[in-house]
Amino acid sequence: MEKLAVGIGQVRRALANRNVAPVVVQKNVCPTCDGTGVELTTDEFGRTFSRSCATCGGLDRIRERAQFRAAKIPRLPERVDVAPAAARYVADFKRLTPGSNWILFSGRAGSGKTTNAAWIATEIITRYKLETRFYPAYEIVRRIATTKSATERDRLIDEAVSTPFVVLDDFLKIFPNKSSYQYSDFFEATLEIVWGRYDARRPLAITTQRDFRFVAEFDAALAGRIVESCDGRIVSFGADAKNWRLRDDP
Ligand SMILES: Nc1ncnc2c1ncn2[C@@H]1O[C@H](COP(=O)(O)OP(=O)(O)OP(=O)(O)O)[C@@H](O)[C@H]1O
Ligand SMILES: [Mg+2]
Ligand SMILES: [Zn+2]
């Protein structure tokens, strides 16, 4: 017969304590400040004061975590091979002129467009503390185009236009064709976001599987604004680009 791994004394103690509230071990809660971001300390004169928690980085970290939650950036791979143009964009970000502060990644599936855009969004939050939204373009456009509520529509557009930094991922990927009854609604929503940010001169990162010629044929005015705002930062992962999803791809 196997011996019980638990001694009778432990059982007795457990029974005696069974009305005691269990200790809930919460993950990621800072032990110093209990997740409040502020800790109380006593100075040399015995005065107690509160300051931003040094253990977890305090309110800044909490604010940053909240920004990440709101941004909805897709999870990055452990190690990101950052495209030089993406690294340069982030490094130069504060020096870019309003009106020429966009970046566009184009290229085929798996070439790393979303990864580079997500990396940029992450850096914009950590380095520049800017509120950020990462939108799958189809999703935001569809939501704007199909919502029944005018106030909800305005709210969505306002968020996409006025958030300090925005990524539109997979721009024009799934788009109703011109003969579809949805086409003009989708088109209008797309223009409202892109032209809204253009008029407000706010930064924008776009990824698209589309060849830029397609964008130009789709709408020349839209393409023109993208070219102007990107100011040379149209980064194309060419046909010979690695497909990261098929790792042994030559
Ligand atoms: N620069 C990179 N560094 C490290 N891993 C990468 C990089 N780019 C891509 N990957 C890996 O390959 C996968 C596919 O890349 P990603 O989603 O960025 O491609 P994509 O160009 O956006 O493709 P699609 O057009 O299908 O959306 C990622 O989930 C990631 O794991
Ligand atoms: Mg992608
Ligand atoms: Zn803390």
Image: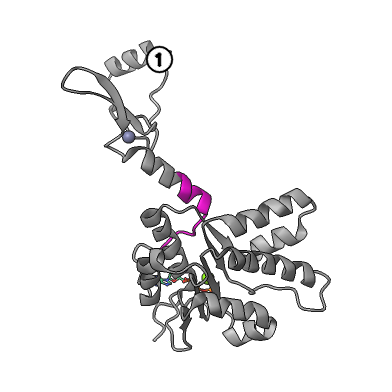
Q: Is residue 71 magenta?
A: yes
Q: Where in the figure is residue 108, as x and y percent of width and height? A: 52, 81
Q: Where in the figure is residue 119, as x and y percent of width and height? A: 42, 64
Q: Secondary structure at mark 1?
A: loop
Q: Is residue 183 above or below residue 238?
A: above
Pick whichever, 228 or 133, lies toward us: 228
Q: Residue at x 31, y 41 (%)?
A: 57
- Of all residues, the one furthest to the left in this rendering is 44
Which of the image's four quarters has the C terminus? bottom left
Q: How many marks?
A: 1
From the viewer's perspective, is 147 left or right of 25? right
Q: Residue at x 20, y 23 (%)?
A: 43
Q: Residue at x 78, y 72 (%)?
A: 183
Q: Is residue 147 above or below residue 114?
A: above
Residue linked to disc 1 = 20
The magenta stretch spans which residues?
Answer: 66-76
Name which residue type carries label 1: Val
Which of the image's four quarters has the N terminus? top left
Q: Residue at x 67, y 83 (%)?
A: 220
Q: Where in the figure is residue 180, as x and y percent of width and height? A: 81, 74
Residue 1 visible in image? no
Pick whichever, 140 or 249, lies toward us: 140
